[in-house]
Image (spheres, rainbow, N blue to C red):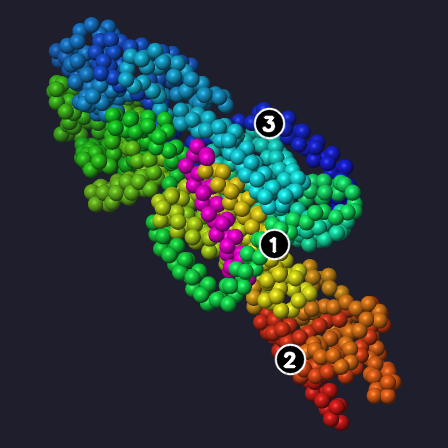
Amino acid sequence: MDLAARHRWLVLAVLASITVAMAWSLDRLQFQLLAEGLASSEPEAVALNSHLHDTYGSESLVVVYLAGANLLDAAGLSSAHATIERIGELPFVARTESLFSVSRMRTVNDEFQASPYLTPPFDEPAVFEEAIEAARRDPFIANNLLAVDRPAMAVNVYLREPDGEDFDARVVAGLDHAIEPVRAEFEQAFQIGGPFVRERIAERIRADQTSIVPLALGVLLVTLGLALRRTSAVALPMTTALLSVVWTLGLMAWLGIPVNVMTSVVPALLVIIGSTEDIHLLSEFIAVRSSGETRARALGAMNRRMGMAVTLTFLTTYLGFLSISLNDLHLLHQFGLIASTGLAFNFAITVSLLPAALSFGPDAGRVRPTRSVADVFGAFAEGLYRRISGARLKVFIATAIIVAVSLYGTLGLRVNNSSLGYFDRQSEVLQRVATLGEEIAGLESFSVLIDSGIQGTFQQVRYLKAIQEFQRWLEDNALADKTLSFADHIALIHTAMEGDDGAQPYLPDFDDVVREYTALVSHDRFAAFVDVDYSEARILVRHDRESTEALAELLDAIQGWAGEHLDRGLRLRATGDSILHLRAADSLIDAQLQSIGMMAVVIVVIIGILFVNVRAGLIAVVPNLVPIVVLFGVMGATGISLDTGTAMTAAIALGICVDDTMHFMVRYHENSRTESRSAVVLARTVREEALPIFSTSLALAAGFATLMVSSFPPVVHFGALSALVIAIAAVATFVLTPLLLASTRLITMWDALSLSLRTRIQDECQLFEGLRPWQVRKTVLLSRVQNYAPGAAIVEQGSRGQELFILLDGAAEVYQARETGERLKLRELGPGSVIGELSLLADMPRTADVIATAQTRALVLDWDGIANLIRVYPRAAAKLYRNLATIIGQRLANVGG
């Protein structure tokens, strides 16, 4: 950051150039949701789904629904037929399936006939009414293309392969145009299917971008203004946030990565999260300037004190988002990569733009302090700390109770990975899906594959009856709205061949008859339901189960039925796009635990290495795991599902929440350099960190809350739950963290490596005898180090104090005043000399003056410091104790002699 301040014009030029380049590509940004984004990438599941599509064709379609009291009269049928004709002429339509195209098989005058149920003109009511009644007995028509008890029909529209980025938009617009002429004639006329759902999602994404990001900026503006009361404190974080948004979206446009329902929240997240480090940096800069320091010195102090903390907090937050990319779900994998990249952009912009911008202006003068705000927060936080420090056991018991209750709440946690979960109950999409499910059959479907591996298996009646038994079980138990199979085809053909035109379709009694039918009728007619050698059959299951949890229950029931009733020589497997979504839902929990575990380990390792103490890493993690447990408990208790939105909450929240803990620990470490009493250090740390932590927590919680205005329920839940976790984590930082740190002193790896100690001290100082060089460094860093100018008194004769001094650098002389007034020089001291060991043992007056004769640095060791050493490094403390006892024994012996 010092480099950025020194080369401010170059920094501004580079940032401006990159921003212009990224902004130039924004007009190419795309908005869409790919269906495979919600699907599992598990190889076995993907391979089975590919086999389904390769063998039986695609099961995806668009349904056009028509309903009205006049639908099945002559005029209504003519209008419906004309609508279907218009649909069939659309360039993206491969074929349509309706009452006007599905063949009616029957025997007339001993002649087998197959022709559409309805063909124009519809001028003979008796004819088309009889055809409609016959159609309601056809399993491929009844509750599939025609409602059995009301005037409603469906048209299955099969689409060609997508041929452009605007394919969905063209499909939706084209079908709407074809349907438009009959909207006034029929009570209901609409389309529903993948393109329509994805287009509505894209529209909502665009709408959210115009509402959430400005709202997040507004919340940030208000929060910063209230907390810091500086124009620069508002303008700079807003600028860094906006630049990072432009860079991220610009990169997506350059790479051709579309904005989907999850990445659409990244701009708001960059505004929300990206501002937190700005607040910490600006708070430090303002605090130093308020004390009367120059702008240059304030920048130096900001960089020196906050550089390490800001870098580490960026790293943990970055890793929190990056861990989301470990998910098998493409939608979350892409979100993790894009969000973490955006945060990296934000960090780079912050550490370059902020110092460069703050370097402008007069390099002298005093900034008006904002202590009124800081004092309020500081007094509150310090009062809270003093209250809880005397009730440690009660706090830990209360925390344990909260965790236990939350763990119990997690028993109600459910998983959902349906694209329909992105819509609320009042949405147009779910209303259309519900109408179709109530009047015809559910829009959702999957396939059940039954195979034997033996050619001709499903040309045998016993196996066709097994399929029918399975279908009846599904429909009789209301487990499916509609099922279709190869057995239905054979039953239809056989009933027609037998001339039982008015009967319900039934299977033949002999295998030879089935083989005759398959030889008579082209396999193309059955291709969607049986493979070419009749060793595998497919049952299409349509249902209205919107959640993957409900679908999982259905699949469990199917597997249970198969285990009890299916022939042992047959294998049953379920597949389809919705099954891939289900498999992905199963992986959400594993990915969640994996992300949280990885984040916890990374934080422990990073903090443990930084502070040369694994315990420090655990202290950083534990207070922030409590809000995560509460999060899952709240989700389970309130019925909020673990989905693509909420699945990323925990890992992200852990990465964000640990930021405040890390700032707290770094400040605690800084303050402990000049004070050995933990209670005093903690009270000071709590007071100094109150404003920046409360400010960032307020900004984060309020910022995440802005996501609650989203059109997508998963995003709403993500925003609400994240705000809750941030709020709980802020409380935990000031309640649990001080209590855990009370018995811990911190040193950093950087301190240990940069500490300059003479080899003579480590080798010859009697107090450090038997200690390894690394233990000596940690002992020095855990104790208080005092600097003395030439002529300054290190110890004054006659003064009292239970402190021991070890000279680390410099030189000193020992003088003793006699009763005659004479001042006698006793000896000269150098690095490694020990002073005041007897006063440490007993509160007795000092017997001589010790005066620094050069710039001198001395280690100050008192009983509080020794107690800290015992708690943190008991082995080193034991050796120190032994050496101290030896030194004191020698001094007493000398005195006695």
Residue type marked 3: Leu
Q: Residue, x 45% and y 43% (percent of image)? A: 720
1 in the magenta segment: no
Counting residues from the start of the chain, the first of labels 2 and 1 encountered is 1
365 vs 864, left or right, is right
820 vs 594, left or right, is right
Counting residues from the start of the chain, the first of labels 3 and 2 encountered is 3
- The disc placed on residue 26 is 3
Name the outermost residue toward the front: 372
- Viewer-proximal residue among 118 and 730: 730
Real-space CA distance between mark 3 and mark 1, rounded to the nearest whole angstrom? 45 Å
Dot in front, 3 or 1: 1
- Above or below, 608 against 23 in this view is below
Q: Residue, x 84% and y 71% (percent of image)? A: 791
Counting residues from the start of the chain, the first of labels 3 and 1 encountered is 3
Viewer can see residue 764: no
Rendering quarter of residue 152 = top left
* Residue under pointer 2: 881
Mark 2: secondary structure: helix
Mark 3: secondary structure: helix
- Above or below, 190 against 276 in this view is above
The prevailing secondary structure element of the residues shown in magenta is helix
Dot in front, 2 or 1: 1
* Residue under pointer 1: 375
Q: Residue, x 63% and y 45% (percent of image)? A: 228
- Please state the horizontal and vertical placement of residue 455, each as a whole percent of the image: 28, 33
